[in-house]
Image (cartoon, rainbow, N blue to C red):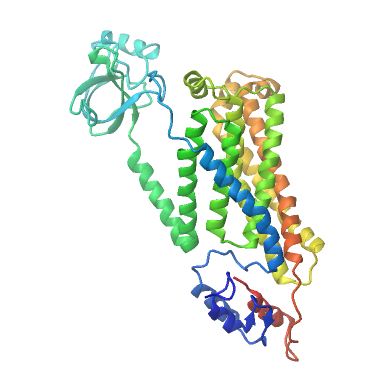
Amino acid sequence: MEQHPYQPPEQLQQDGLEQGSGHRGNPRHGHSRGHEHAHHRNHGHSHSHGPATPVSKHLRKVIAAVLVPFSAAVIVALVLLWPGGAPPHQRTGVGFDRQTQQATVAKVVEVSCGSANASAGTPAAGTSATGDNRAARETGGICRKATIRVDTGNDRGRRFTEIVQPDQSRQLHQGEKVVVAYEPSAPKDLQYSVTDVNRKLPVALLAGIFALAVVVVGRMRGVMALIALAVSFLILALFILPAILQGSNPLVVAVIGASAIMLIALYLCHGLSARTSVAVLGTLISLAMIGVLGSLFIDWAALTGNTDDSTGLIHGLYPSIDMSGLLLAGVIIGSLGVLDDVTVTQTSAVWELHEANPSMGWRGLYRAGIRIGRDHIASVVNTLVLAYAGAALPLLLLFSIAQSSLATVANSELVAEEIVRTLVGSIGLVASVPVTTALAALVVSADRPGPSTPAPAGAQPAQALGSRRGRRRKR
């Protein structure tokens, strides 16, 4: 029922253009900017971002010839590698691999640490009763004796006590919701222990505030962004993680999962258009570059990916998982989010430049777009480095306490892993700017505007340009 897949019939009638059939009506030069803005507000349900794609059907076919087979390959790979869920295993009772239940602190009383029942071996709020805790008991400090009530599971209603030392970072309070670990093989009075605080309410509230802010500011596009975010988490939780646990190659799984996330997120948020397709191509090329560089330097630097308790536990439970491949998969998935931002921004910048000056050739568009991209590169690289440095701040602090030299710190696998992750991702981001800008400039400049009726005598160039911008918007 639409004459062009991206523009409603009423817009075609108003502009006097029949873009789908190639016929151009009489242009009108009297539109005010306020009327143009009001019109686009009335069509706010469209998911396109700014001006739509001024490209010919031939170029759209060329783009589709690349992306349709790629999308089909991603779908087929998802079907072939789709896991049936995480494989079962015997719980070790270590770290996250423990049975947990929800509980409530029913009562808290202050007692003398010296008179507390330390001989029972009950851990103090999830920590060992050694070192400073033993010193606190010997000096007769004031401890807290908490009575915990189990709220879920087969032992619902069961109570146990926990001694909290005064120097513990986590102090229990009456009425507080906590998470308790359950070890069925332990003696009955030691089967339960407090392992963490229940943070579901504040985290859920913060997520609700975030979603509300996105919807209020982004409106329909914000809703689409939230849907894309939910789909990304579903792909991560239902495909990427279980497939790796089932023994599939982590790199292959990450590439397929990241490609699916990229296609869904970009087209859902920015619309099914040639401009979005250019951003997808730029992202795909940059991801391939990150994968090649990451594989090369992870092997060259002999990074095992097994550097902390979590990765050690994973390797112990599933020895068949390639931990270095898992590290590379993390690099690819971690870079995808920022890559989307860079490629979409660069593509939009080139489209806007072409809209402002349709006579500009691809070289001029590339030079102007790359000038915008240089500012983007500086901010994005700094963002990546600071993000990784912030995540590794406790580790860097430990090296500072040990007064290790910079070379020693950088050479350790823990820090070298973050350095390789940061630099490989940053190289891919830097490369995505010229790659995406060149693709967008080539595509957008390949379709020259047709002849139009001259502007009325005495019309200002800015007014004529504004009128042309109003007429040339395509959906």
Q: Residue at x 23, y 20 (%)?
A: 161
Is residue 408 shown above or below 106?
Answer: above
Q: Position of residue 357 (x, y in %)?
A: 75, 71
Q: Residue at x 41, y 56 (%)?
A: 212
View extreme (left): residue = 157
Q: Residue at x 67, y 85 (%)?
A: 27
Horizontally, residue 470 falls left or right of residue 190, namely right
Task: Work out whether residue 247 can be spotted.
Answer: yes
278 and 361: which is toward the camera: 278
Task: Work out whether residue 345 can be spotted.
Answer: no
Q: Position of residue 97 (x, y in %)?
A: 40, 23
Q: Looking at the figure, which quarter contains the C terminus?
A: bottom right
Q: Residue at x 35, y 13 (%)?
A: 129
189 and 112: which is toward the camera: 189
Q: Position of residue 107 (x, y in %)?
A: 20, 27
Q: Position of residue 133 (x, y in %)?
A: 36, 14
